[in-house]
Amino acid sequence: MFSVRTSMSGRNYSPGVLIGNWNEDVCLEEDLLKDFLYKRERGELLIQKSKKLKETLYKKEQLSISKDGFIHFGDTVLLVNPEIKRPLGADATLECGSLSLAVSPDEITVHTAEKMPSYCEVTAIKSVSAVGRNAFRILSLEGESMGEPVRYGQNFGLGATGGFADQMLYLASDHKKFLNMAKKSACQPAFLTDELSYLASWQAVYLDPQLRMEHEGFPVPANTKILIVHSHTNRGLAVPRTFWIRTYFGKEFEVNCHTYLDTHRAEEDKNYWVVVTGNPSDESTTMFDRPKPPSEDTREHNQDLCIETCQ
């Protein structure tokens, strides 16, 4: 079949010029148009699939409201790496604002799939508003009933639906291997998988190392800085903030599973996490959006002055 009509001088003719297999070309164009209209009616065009998946990922989610101030099995929460102070001499491009853990499907999945894949990466995004991408559910792994508080040192799972009601992926990690490591930092990777196994088991650890053993077994408070440690490898979930990757959704930051220690052998702010719950006074916002009481601001200011004096 001749698809290009060319004269002796090399000039291409338009489809309206009836030369060669013109009838076959007209039928082919009609079939292509019919196929396009059929796929558009069924929502099978790539642009329609991409738009539907993006709308689902950015659909607003309602977070659970903590009545007793603790986090519980079954709660829907945000995992936020809180704002950090810019170190002296740090690069001006260093992101110091709050970042939330989010689902990050690859570009091929966004364009072709209608739901989340069985394996997916996680990144840290600047938005701290509850949407399908960054809403996680706290899961029971050892038979605890829903509604019971999560305790320090107790295993739990973190599941993400991405906005889909009939699908859930689980946050997991595994030992670093040559073909399985974080892209930029080359540390132990963190990822989402559809298999709920020992690789998807995590624990909450108290922030202060000197008081860590005393808090073992106590309920984990919501909206407070804690450490989230992988149960199998004993590595902390972290956002280095110095490594960013390009995704379909824009510039986002790498998330890995590595414990960053300072000179005092204490975890750095890269490993700090806040389990954010819903705001009981305003369902459209979170507890992270509520202003701090004046007493907390004064206490933090006094702590900063004490640190500066000691240095």
Image: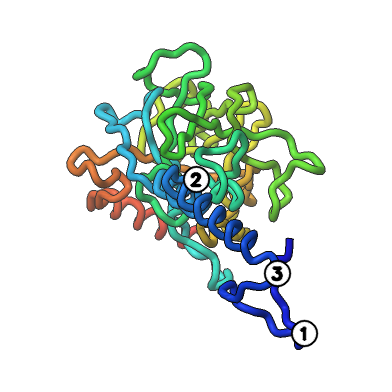
Kindly identify which residue carries mark 1.
Answer: 8
- Give the amino acid type for the residue marked by disc 1 in the picture: Met
Numbered badge on residue 44: 2
- Which sits earlier in the primary sequence, circle 3 or circle 2? 3
Tell me where residue 78 sits by quadrant.
top left
Does residue 238 appear anywhere in the picture? Answer: no
Image point (53%, 38%), residue name:
116
Numbered badge on residue 66: none
Quarter holding the N terminus? bottom right
What percent of the width, then of the height, locates residue 42? Answer: 44, 42
As rendered, which of 142 and 31 lies closer to the eye? 31
- Give the amino acid type for the residue marked by disc 3 in the picture: Gly
What percent of the width, then of the height, locates residue 112? Answer: 57, 46
Q: Secondary structure at mark 1?
A: loop
- Give the amino acid type for the residue marked by disc 2 in the picture: Glu
Q: Is residue 310 above or below residue 282?
A: below
**How many numbered marks are there?**
3
Q: Is residue 27 above or below residue 141?
A: below
Numbered badge on residue 20: 3
As rendered, which of 92 and 29 lies closer to the eye? 29
Image point (68%, 31%), residue name:
233
- Which sits earlier in the primary sequence, circle 2 or circle 1? 1
What percent of the width, then of the height, locates residue 174? Answer: 69, 33
| Alpha carbon distance from label 3 to label 2 | 34 Å
